[in-house]
Image (cartoon, rainbow, N blue to C red):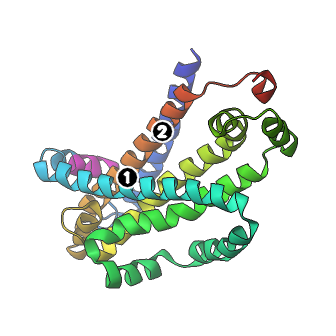
Amino acid sequence: MKHLKKICRVLLIAAFWICVWALLSIAFGNELLFPSPLLVLQTLFRLVQTPEFYITTLNSLLNILKGLAIAVSSACITAVITSKIPLLRALILPLMSVIKATPVASFIMLAWIFIGASDVPVFIAELIVFPVIWTNLDEGLSKVDPQLSEVARVYGFSPMKRLRLLILPTTKPYFISACRTSLGLSWKAGIAAEILTMPPSTIGTEIATAKLYIMTPEMFAWTLTVILLSLAMEFGLMAILKRADTPQKGGIENA
């Protein structure tokens, strides 16, 4: 019953915003400028019937997944190292601030010069996600109870046991929050890189082409595809993390 209510609530919210979209389309009075939800869905339905749609979607999905995987793994390793070396952490902090403050377009243009168009989306997704993961994990690691750390040291806990009973329970909320934020950011940054550099057979290139030839319904349809893929990835990640969530009752005290 609880899940049914949640589904109904989500559907009602979606219906509300679709109605807002439809009203805006009517207000514009020109579907070439602002297409209706029905026209966009019809366009998307036409696109999904072509093999090129799946090749294009898969290429962009792989770009985002590669960037995410590299960013998450490297940020986790860096966060652990900087938590042990305060000087290194102090040196990295300004760099993280610079990355977060610099416009994505600037990074895209610079990367395009040095690494080529095909690799830019992966690099940009990685670059934008890295500071988010590192910052959250850095905060989480700083919250690890020093008294419990001392207990783990005195009792000679192995690194894996310390990780499982002490570090993971503390940092997990920060990591989950970072991942949820990063999924949306990676799609925004990665697709923006594809739009500007236009590597072959990617969603961003299709959006840029649709804009160039004023094919607004196609542009909306590809944008809707990005949104649906991002939501599906977020839902899948949350489902995996929820299933893997096995709380340690009593934590380190019961070790």
Q: Secondary structure at mark 2?
A: helix
Q: Residue at x 59, y 60 (%)?
A: 78
Q: Position of residue 203 (x, y in %)?
A: 27, 60
Judged left or right of residue 99, residue 212 is: left
Judged left or right of residue 174, residue 216 is: left
Query: Which stretch appears magenta?
Result: 37-44
Res. 222 image quadrant: bottom left
Quarter placement of the C terminus: top right
Res 211 visible: no
Name the residue tied to disc 1.
Answer: 65
Mark 1 crowd level (few <14, some 14–19, many ≥20, 10 Å Cα): some
Res 7 visible: yes
Q: Is residue 127 magenta?
A: no
Q: Position of residue 250 (x, y in %)?
A: 79, 23
Q: Residue at x 56, y 22 (%)?
A: 5
Q: Position of residue 204 (x, y in %)?
A: 30, 65
Name the residue tied to disc 2.
Answer: 237
Determine the CA span between mark 2 and mark 1: 12 Å
Q: Nearer the viewer, residue 60 or 226?
A: 60
Looking at the image, the residue that sits furthest to the right is 147
Q: Considering only order in the chain, which callout, 1 or 2, is on the residue closer to the N terminus?
A: 1
Q: Residue at x 37, y 47 (%)?
A: 229
Q: Amino acid at mark 1?
A: Leu
Q: Is residue 41 magenta?
A: yes
Q: Position of residue 178 (x, y in %)?
A: 60, 51
